[in-house]
Image (spheres, helix red, strand yellow):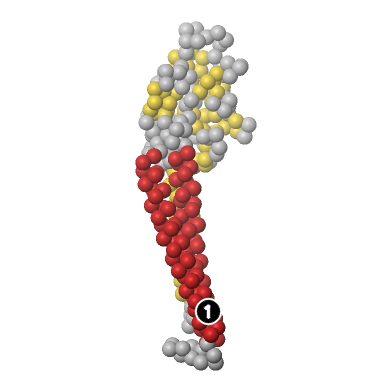
Amino acid sequence: MRNAQGKNADSVAEWWPHKMENALLVGLSAQIALRRNMDIIANNLANVSTAGFKRETPMFEELLASIEADTGSMREVSFVRDWGVLRDMTSGPLLQTGSAFDVAVEGNGMLVVRTAEGDRYTRDGHLKLDAQGQIVTANGDPILGDGGPISVPAGVTDIKIADDGTVSTPQGVIGRFAVVSFPPAALTKEGKNLYSAEGTPEPAQNTRILQGMIERSNVEPVYEMTQMIEVLRAYQHSTEQLNATDDLIRRALQRLGEVKV
C-alpha cells in the first residue's frame, strides 16, 4: 500500500519517526538551555544579600548540525548550545555598616586575597581581624597589602582606612590595601565569593576604598523574578510541544501498524 505522497508503508515507517526525532532533539536542546538559564537566575537570587556579588546572565548560541533529509540530501537543523556566562561587573549599592574593618571598593578595583591555592580576588569587603591580628576575609583568608598581609598591633582599636587604601593607627601607617584590576573576561568565578584570574594584575585606577561600608550585590530581585517567570513559561511551552510531537509519532506508528499491504 502507498500513501498520498507515493511512499509505501515501510518507507513511511522509517521516514516519519526519523523526521520527528529531529524535532524532539531540537526541543530537548532548548529545554537544556532553559534549565541552565533557570539555574543561573536561581543562583543570582540566592546571592542577593552576598556582599560584592555580581549577577550573571547565560549566553547561548545557535548550533547548526547537518542531518540527512528523507530525500537523501543533507539539511541543517538548528540547535541551542550553552556558550558561557556573562558577568555584570557594574557596582552594587553601598551599605553603611559602621564597622572599622568593613570596606567598599568604589570603582573597578578588587582586593587581593591570599589563599592556600594562591592569590585570589574579591569585591567582598566584609573583613575582620583574626587571632594573629591580621585583616582577613569572612572565611579567614588574609587580605594583602602592598607588602603582604596587613597586621594590626595588639590592643589597637582605632583604625583608619583612607580612600587610597592606606591603613593607619595612632602610631602610624601599618599598610596599604593592594587594589588591582583585570578585564572582566580574565576573571573566573570560584567559591567563597572569590575569583581567579589570568594574566598579571594592574593597579586599579580611579578607585577608592570606603571605610565602614560594604558593596551589596548588584542583583535586582524583581527583575530576576520576572526572568524566572518568563523562563518557566518558555519551559512549559517547550514541554507541551515535545509532548505533542511524541503523541504524533505514537499515533502515526499505530496507524502504520494497522496498514495492510
Answer left or right for 154 relative to 105: right
Q: Secondary structure at mark 1?
A: helix
Residue name at image x 42 percent, y 29 percent:
215
Number of numbered discs visible in the structure rendering: 1
* 33 or 230: nearer the viewer: 230
Residue name at image x 54 percent, y 29 percent:
113
Figure quadrant of residue 234: bottom left
The local crowd at label 1, few if under 14, some if 14 to 19, many if 20 or more residues have their Cα within 10 Å, is some
How far across and down, in percent of the image, does residue 181 sit? 45, 34
Q: Tell me which amino acid carries mark 1.
A: Leu
What is the quadrant of the C terminus in the image? bottom right
Residue 166: tell me if it is visible.
no
Residue 248: tell me if it is visible.
yes
How far across and down, in percent of the image, does residue 93 sit? 37, 31
Q: Is residue 107 above or below residue 40?
A: above
Q: Is residue 245 above or below residue 261?
A: above
Question: Which residue in the structure is indicated by mark 1?
Answer: 253
How far across and down, in percent of the image, does residue 22 sit? 49, 71
How far across and down, in percent of the image, does residue 97 sit? 42, 21
Residue name at image x 46 percent, y 49 percent:
38
Residue name at image x 49 percent, y 53 percent:
35
Q: Is residue 83 above or below residue 8?
A: above
* 202 or 188: nearer the viewer: 188
